[in-house]
Amino acid sequence: MSDPAGILPTRIAVVGATGLVGRAVMEAAVGREDVRLVAISRREAPMPEGARMEMFVADPQDWGDVFKSVNAEVLVSALGTTIRKVGGDQDAFYAVDHDLVLQTAQFARDAGLERMIAVSSVGADPHSDNFYLKTKGQTEKALIKSGFKRLDLLRPGLLRGTRKADLRPLEGLGRLASPLADLALRGKYAKYRSIHSVMLAHAVLALAKRKTQGKFMHEHEALQRAAKMLPEIDSDA
């Protein structure tokens, strides 16, 4: 069932709309009356067919002004790049996955947003020897101190779904092997199981509707539970 009539939709600002997760969130919101999306991006991205949303294209330095104008309640950060995409430049990777995420969070806080959902990674650890996981962990640590009344940190494993204009051969092989690999990941290793971008998007929308204050970490099983809590859309809505 959809939310009861008369309930105002939750207004969500999405950054990282050009990526796999951001696009999945936009697609998952199509036809829903309980959420309203506003995408904020560095470059224009195609919106899903039937989407009722706005997209603001601006330089990241100007995102603060955008946040002040869109009247959103929740920030969803799906920002991220890869070492391959930045030519192996760790500083360039850090500038996006750490600096830009925190800058965006600060812009949102300055505009009065009190809730944030950030897509991180399973295994994120500020003390990791792995540069990727260390960066993700440092970003999480900083976000926890950023002043949001509610912060949801999502830690998915390998993301399944079709990436457009961002081919990742090794990830592609991993996605093919993931159904078998997932069967072997049990107990404390279950958090490393792969998850489809559609399910992650449903978890994002469900969590965006929660207002209980606190800092929450969601790994594989918690993400699945959250996704299943997203109300269905009435067929006659």
Image (cartoon, grey):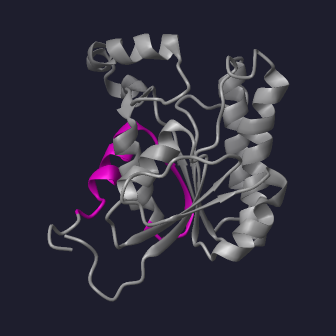
Q: Residue 136, relative to residue 44: is it above or below?
A: above
Q: Residue 54, relative to residue 20: is it above or below?
A: below
Furthest-bottom residue in this view: 6
Is residue 10 or residue 223 the one in the foreground? 10
| Quadrant of the image containing the C terminus | bottom left
- Label count reads 0
- Residue in view at x 58 percent, y 45 percent: 78
Q: Residue 108, relative to residue 159: is it above or below?
A: below
Residue 230 inside the magenta-drawn segment: yes
Question: Range of the magenta residues?
Answer: 209-232
- Residue in view at x 76 percent, y 50 percent: 102
- Residue in view at x 72 percent, y 31 percent: 135
Q: Hey, which quadrant is residue 7 in on the image?
A: bottom left
Q: Hey, which quadrant is residue 71 in on the image?
A: bottom right
Q: Residue 222, relative to residue 58: is it above or below?
A: above
Residue 112 visible (yes or no): no
Q: Residue 210: x and y, percent?
A: 44, 68
Q: Residue 61: x and y, percent?
A: 84, 54
Instruction: Give the side of residue 106 with respect to residue 167, left or right.
Output: right
Is residue 148 or residue 171 the one in the foreground? 171
Q: Residue 196: x and y, percent?
A: 36, 34
Residue 215 visible (yes or no): yes
Q: Residue 169: x and y, percent?
A: 50, 11
